[in-house]
Amino acid sequence: MTDDTPLCLACSQDLEFNGMLRSKREDDGRQTCRSLWSGAERHLWMA
Ligand SMILES: [Zn+2]
């Protein structure tokens, strides 16, 4: 079975969705939204 929950690349645990983060892209200065995920080992990932 697979679902949409991504796995942490560092510890292979399920990640928990932690909301959206708005950030400015360095390339062209435009605002972009990234999703923020956190894992069991307090790993943080942005996608
Ligand atoms: Zn992790």
Image (spheres, rainbow, N blue to C red):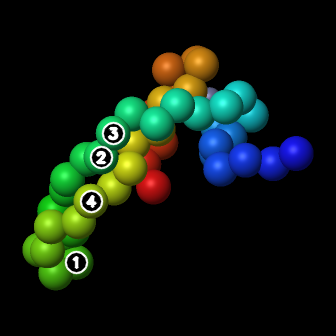
**7 on left or right of 27:** right
* Labels 4 and 3: the sequence-earlier one: 3
Q: How far apart in space, not on screen, are marks 4 and 2 (Cα)?
A: 6 Å
* Labels 1 and 4: the sequence-earlier one: 1
Q: Residue at x 71, y 29 (%)?
A: 13
Query: Visible in this render: residue 32?
Result: yes
Label 2 sits on what residue type? Met
* Labels 3 and 1: the sequence-earlier one: 3
* Labels 1 and 2: the sequence-earlier one: 2
Q: Quick one: label 2, few (<14), some, or many (20+) residues within 10 Å?
A: some
Residue 23 quadrant:
bottom left
Label 3 sits on what residue type? Gly
Quarter placement of the N terminus:
top right
Whether label 1 touches label 2, CB < 8 Å: no
- Residue 33 in the image, given as x and y percentages of width and height: 27, 59
Q: Is residue 19 above or below residue 4?
A: above
Q: Residue furthest bottom?
A: 28
Whether label 4 touches label 2, CB < 8 Å: yes
Q: Quick one: label 1, few (<14), some, or many (20+) residues within 10 Å?
A: few
Q: Nearer the viewer, residue 7 or 5?
A: 5
Nearer to us: label 3 or label 1: 3
Whether label 2 touches label 3, CB < 8 Å: yes
Residue picked out by circle 2: 20
Label 4 sits on what residue type? Cys
Label 1 sits on what residue type? Asp
Residue picked out by circle 4: 33
Dot label at residue 19: 3
* Labels 4 and 2: the sequence-earlier one: 2
**Disc 1, SS:** loop
Q: Residue at x 64, y 43 (%)?
A: 5
